[in-house]
Amino acid sequence: MFQIDPLSHMPVYEQLIKQAETFVLSGILAEGDKLPSVRALAGKLSVNPNTIQKAFAELDRRGITRSVPGKGSFISPEAKEILRSEHREELKELKAYLEKFRLAGIREEEILGCVKEVYGGES
């Protein structure tokens, strides 16, 4: 499930956080699902356990997961809504990019084409 790209400029713990977020938003991980143990994931990925723990601690801090001592980390009931909320905030950044595209002369049809490509005709 989790994979790291050793050639990425993104730190390993951030790669793990981004992957967990993607898994939650796409439904691969759902409310109550257990994350792999720190030791198991560290062994599988050949990564220092402290790196895995750092990613898991950040997910826990943000409310994406809940840690149960002696049991592990589980996807929280509100994880998907927390992530959706964070992404809605990023719409402000998208709006700024769209303004730059408009000023650069990129036509609305090109932008809408990109949106349709990403959303694949979803309504």
Image: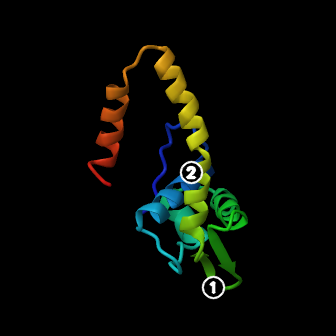
| Image quadrant assignment for residue 40 | bottom right
Q: Mark 2 vs mark 1: which is more N-terminal?
A: 1
Looking at the rendered image, the quarter that the C terminus falls into is bottom left
Q: Residue furthest top?
A: 104
Q: Is residue 85 above or below residue 15?
A: below
Residue 58: x %, y % from top left: 69, 60
Q: Which dot marks residue 71?
A: 1
Q: Is residue 113 left or right of residue 55?
A: left
Q: Nearer the viewer, mark 2 or mark 1?
A: 2
Q: Is residue 9 left or right of residue 66?
A: left
Please give the residue where the numbered disc 2 appears in the rendered image.
87
Q: Work out how far the residue at label 2 is from the one at label 1, CA to CA, in angstroms.
A: 30 Å
For the question of whether residue 9 can be seen, the reply is no
Residue 100: x %, y % from top left: 53, 21
Q: Secondary structure at mark 1?
A: loop
For the question of whether residue 90 can be seen, the reply is yes
- Disc 2, disc 1: CB below 8 Å? no
Q: What is the crowding at mark 1: few (fewer than 14 residues within 10 Å), some, or many (at least 20)?
A: few
Q: Is residue 101 above or below residue 94?
A: above
Q: Secondary structure at mark 2?
A: helix
Q: Is residue 108 left or right of residue 41?
A: left
| Amino acid type shown at disc 1 | Lys
Q: Is residue 52 above or below residue 113?
A: below
Depth check: 110 or 75 in front?
110
| Image quadrant assignment for residue 110 | top left
Residue 83: x %, y % from top left: 57, 59
Query: Residue at horizontal 50%, vertical 55%?
Result: 19
Q: What is the crowding at mark 2: few (fewer than 14 residues within 10 Å), some, or many (at least 20)?
A: few
| Amino acid type shown at disc 2 | His
